[in-house]
Amino acid sequence: MLKELKIFNTIIEPGKSYKLNFNMAKLYTSTSIEVPVIINRSKKAGPIVLVTGGIHGDEINGIEVVRQLISKKINRPVSGTIIAIPVLNVFGFLSGKREFPDGRDLNRVFPGTKSGALASRFAYQVSSEILPHVDIILDFHTGGAQRFNVPHIRVSQLEVNSWNLAKVFNAPFLMHGNNIKKTFRATCSDLGKTYLLFEGGMSNRNDKEVVDTAVNGAIRVLDHLKMLRSDVYVERRNEESIIVTDSMWIRAKYSGLLHPKVKTGKRVERDEIIAIITDPYGELKYKVKSPHMGYVINVNQSPLVYQGDGIFHISKHGE
Ligand SMILES: [Zn+2]
């Protein structure tokens, strides 16, 4: 006998697909905001996997990843259940913003409260209606505006199940990072769930390479969990993820026009020239050098920088 699964007062039957809605708030115009939750349950028992995008409304890559998983029917498992929420923060998605309309970051109000501010109420619904059923969460993010992140999984090395599953996901980079309080990730961790945070590219952009990397990682995870349909192609990478446990930001010594010379993902050597900062008058030409050997995990793509702005995030490998 399969266990009963009930979400938003709907019994999720084996072998069936559902599109449920969080129907929890309205716009000023009285228009209801619907947040679709797409659930596919196999007849065969197995893990319950939640895939989420758009917890930050402007992180389009993550939304596109979940969209592709649905559109390519990868979310129809041969065992277990897949719950897909492509856009958690529909409000922010509509307005092209990271935050909820109340100005709050949905990813800093978890697990939320029943009668708190709008974002907090929403977080509460996710935490109380969905998360208790789930075994594994794949949460897709991007870097910030103008800051292009190399595709990576960020989890804590101390969370062994998550760390091991991150190796199966096999993004180009695997970064150790401690939990930040009140994040979705911290709540998942407190509940003892296996949780992978993917981050790649930057906000308000749809980057094909980043999306492909994430979709292929999700496919490898579902294959590993024996949930993947046999007709879905599993792309194997020849290399293991490069593990990053320490890193530092390189900051601009001068204000000016920034000309980066290296791309994300590239290995740089100590004293290698990684950018030039110039002024508009043809006088300043400052060479930015890497202080150590490492991999470029984030590049600031803004054409202009102020003194002190972070321009590169480079890994450290215990030299
Ligand atoms: Zn994010």
Image (tube, rainbow, N blue to C red):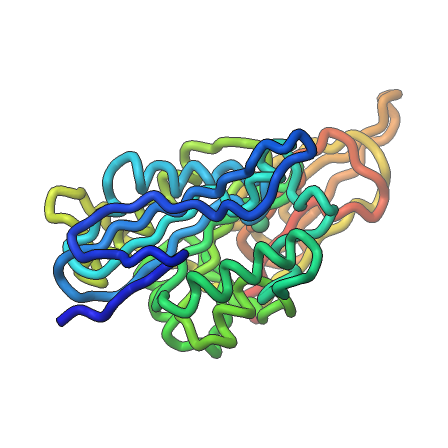
Q: Quadrant of residue 241?
A: bottom left
User: At which x and y percent is residue 254?
Assistant: 85, 41
Q: In the rendered view, tell whether residue 278 sits above or below residue 222.
A: above
- For this orientation, the residue located farthest to the top is 281
User: At which x and y percent is residue 265?
Assistant: 49, 46
Where, quadrant-wise, is the N terminus in this rendering? bottom left
Residue sitting nearer the eye, 232 or 121 = 121
- Horizontal relation, residue 191 to residue 319: left or right: left
Where, quadrant-wise, is the C terminus in this rendering? bottom right
Q: In the rendered view, tell whether residue 168 sits above or below residue 162.
A: above
User: At which x and y percent is residue 132?
Assistant: 41, 69
Identify the residue shown where x is 78% and y is 30%.
257
- Residue 319 in sight from this viewpoint: no
Residue sitting nearer the eye, 16 or 237 = 16
**Callout count:** 0
Identify the residue shown where x is 47% and y is 33%.
207
- Horizontal relation, residue 99 to residue 126: left or right: right
Q: In the rendered view, tell whether residue 211 sits above or below residue 80.
A: above
Residue sitting nearer the eye, 108 or 168 = 108
Identify the residue shown where x is 52% and y is 44%.
54
Q: Quadrant of residue 165?
A: bottom left
Identify the residue shown where x is 77% and y is 34%.
277
User: At which x and y percent is residue 302?
Assistant: 71, 33
Q: Quadrant of residue 90?
A: top right
- Residue 301 in sight from this viewpoint: yes
